[in-house]
Image: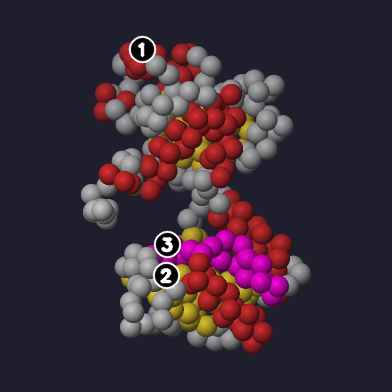
Amino acid sequence: MICDFYRQVIQLLKTEPIALATIISIKGSVPREIGAKMVILENGHTIGTIGGGAGEAKVIQHARVVLSTGDKQLVEIDLSGSPQRETQGVCGGIMQVLVDRWTGDWAIALVQQILTHLEAGQPVTLVTPLTAAPLPHLITSNSAPRTPHSIFTETLQPPPLLLIVGAGHVGEQLAKVADLIGFQVAVQDDRPEWANRDRYPQAAHIFNESITDTLAQLTHHLHLFATLVTRGYQCDRAALQALLHRELACDYIGMIGSQKRVKQVYQALATEVSPERLATVYAPIGLDIGALTPEEIAVSIAAELILVRRGGSGKPLSKKVGVLSFEF
């Protein structure tokens, strides 16, 4: 998760300089997106990845020089597989990676500013000059880039918040998987013996009050995903009603249960919620992978969360149109 990445960065900066490698442009098929980052330390250890393989190894070599000299470098990683050029892979594209040294008080202060915004659920725009000066900085209402043709500007998005409504067995496993795939986790259940820090160490927030009071504390989160994995029909109804009436619409609402249970909840809300709003709910929740155990159900739900967040199709990659086929 992006917040975890910057938390590790700020701890490292307190003791040593780091080289920050950022993908600033891509062409063709490449393993990572623009903005993907990796930290390289003087001992060669890394945090994060820009795609692995020989291309990443090349960046690590350049990072050692950047750490020594303080002079940023722009590194090209050629993954085209062209026999006419020295290539570092065969993905089919080319990446430009900026490697810059971050060190000292200014870097610590900047990372703390970034974390303050992201942890509050708000995006923040980071400007990194491609030349020696000025230092990387954030764009605020009172400032603007001075050299628009020699900077890399990126908007850092806060991690989406997954609100798990219901702290039972499925919720416990879902929190683990959601944390792994980059969601900030919140749990709501009126039973403290179920919703607590011992069972949910990954959770940024644990709420033992009502769903209405919980949502009142989450109004500032721009990207809220909600999963209803509650203990019963009444809990489903109350949660779904509150979520569908949230002033800022949720990015995703999913509800566990059989077709019969889902139908009962929908019927109970028919006079309060329009059919169009109910149609936006993913119910029953998850992708059909034959999941049975709480762990498997959590993976099924997480797969649907990724699909909605990233815009996938949900089809097997082996069946996707355009995938290479081989004849023997």
Q: Main secondary structure of the magenta part?
A: loop
| Circle 2/circle 1 CB separation < 8 Å | no
From which residue to which does the magenta span run? 30-52
- Kindly identify the residue that appears in the image at 70 percent across and 68 percent down: 13
Q: CA distance from mark 3 to mark 1?
A: 43 Å
Question: In the orientation shown, which residue stands out farthest toward the front?
Answer: 328
Horizontal relation, residue 119 to residue 281: left or right = right
Which residue is depicted at the point 53% across and 76% down?
A: 58
Q: Which amino acid lies under the numbered mark 2 shown in the image of this protein?
A: Gly
Which numbered disc flags the more N-terminal residue, 2 or 1?
2
The residue carrying pointer 3 sits among few (fewer than 14), some (14 to 19) or many (20 or more) residues within 10 Å by Cα, namely some
Percent across and percent down for residue 45 are 66, 67
Judge whether 300 appears above or below 328 on screen: above
Which residue has dot 3 on it?
Answer: 31
* Label 3: element kind: loop
Q: Amino acid at mark 1?
A: Lys
Disc 2: which residue: 89
Residue under label 1: 260
Secondary structure found at label 2: loop
The answer to the question of whether label 3 and label 1 lie on touching residues, with beta carbons closer than 8 A, is no
Distance Cα–Cα, label 2 vs label 1? 51 Å
- The answer to whether residue 227 is seen in the rendering is yes
Amino acid type for the residue under numbered disc 3: Pro
Of the image marks 3 and 2, the number of the one nearer the N terminus: 3
